[in-house]
Image: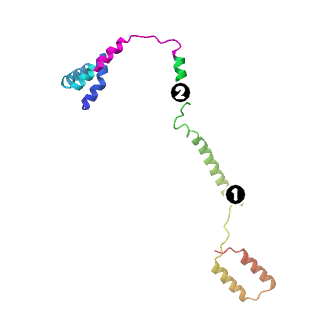
Amino acid sequence: MNGDCKRIENTLSDYVDGLSEAEKRTQLEQHLQSCANCAEALRQTRALVQAAGQLGGRKAPIDLWPAVRQRLPVHAPRRLWFAQWAWRPAVALPSMLAVLAAGLLLNWLPSYRMTPEPQVSAPVLREYAEQRSAQVFSAGDAFVFAAEVESAPIQ
């Protein structure tokens, strides 16, 4: 079965019903003369249409649909895949604007500005202590020096 056969097989029902265009009908008939598989498929399609026509029309009972609906499984309606994300842009934009406004407000108000504490390294502190120990201290100077050493952060 080649690509031509696939195309022909898809148009057989229209051919049997008389709905195919004249040009396509001619191409189909030419193909059917050379392809036994497609000729057999046409025979089967015609037999199926004939058998379906012999079934006759039956009217469905009036209460058929409620009985069918009752037997169908109940499923919750499916949400579209993007529906679960649809609310996020509506919340994200105001949130980002609020954070931006808070950052700008804190930056412009000088009382909220945080200045880092000066860091004193250990060698600088040691040098300062040596310089100060060479000097003569009074009792008050020793107390101030001890407070300075204790409060200075060591890196």
Q: Amino acid at mark 1?
A: Leu
Q: Secondary structure at mark 1?
A: loop
Verify whether residue 55 appears in magenta. Answer: yes
Q: Identify the residue at horizontal 26%, vertical 19% (top origin).
A: 43
In which quadrant will I find the C terminus?
Answer: bottom right
In the image, residue 37 lies at what x, y percent? 23, 26
In the image, residue 1 lies at what x, y percent? 24, 31
Residue 26 appears left or right of 126: left
Verify whether residue 99 appears in magenta. Answer: no
Residue 144 appears left or right of 75: right
Image: 68 above or below 103: above
Q: Nearer the viewer, residue 150 or 93?
A: 150
Residue 11 appears left or right of 154: left
In the image, residue 84 lies at what x, y percent? 56, 39
Q: Identify the residue at horizontal 76%, vertical 89% (top origin).
A: 136
Stretch in magenta: 44-64
Circle 2 residue: 73
Q: Quick one: label 2, few (<14), some, or many (20+) residues within 10 Å?
A: few
Q: Quick one: label 1, few (<14), some, or many (20+) residues within 10 Å?
A: few
Image: 69 above or below 90: above
Q: Amino acid at mark 2?
A: Pro
Query: What is the distance, in whole Å, between disc 2 and disc 1 at their CAs?
Result: 63 Å
Find the residue positioned furthest to the right: 139
Q: Is residue 20 shown to the viewer in this render?
A: no
Residue 35 appears left or right of 112: left
| Scheme of image coloration | rainbow
Q: Nearer the viewer, residue 42 or 145?
A: 42
Q: Identify the residue at horizontal 77%, vertical 86% (top origin).
A: 137
Q: Identify the residue at horizontal 24%, vertical 25% (top origin).
A: 38
Circle 1 residue: 109
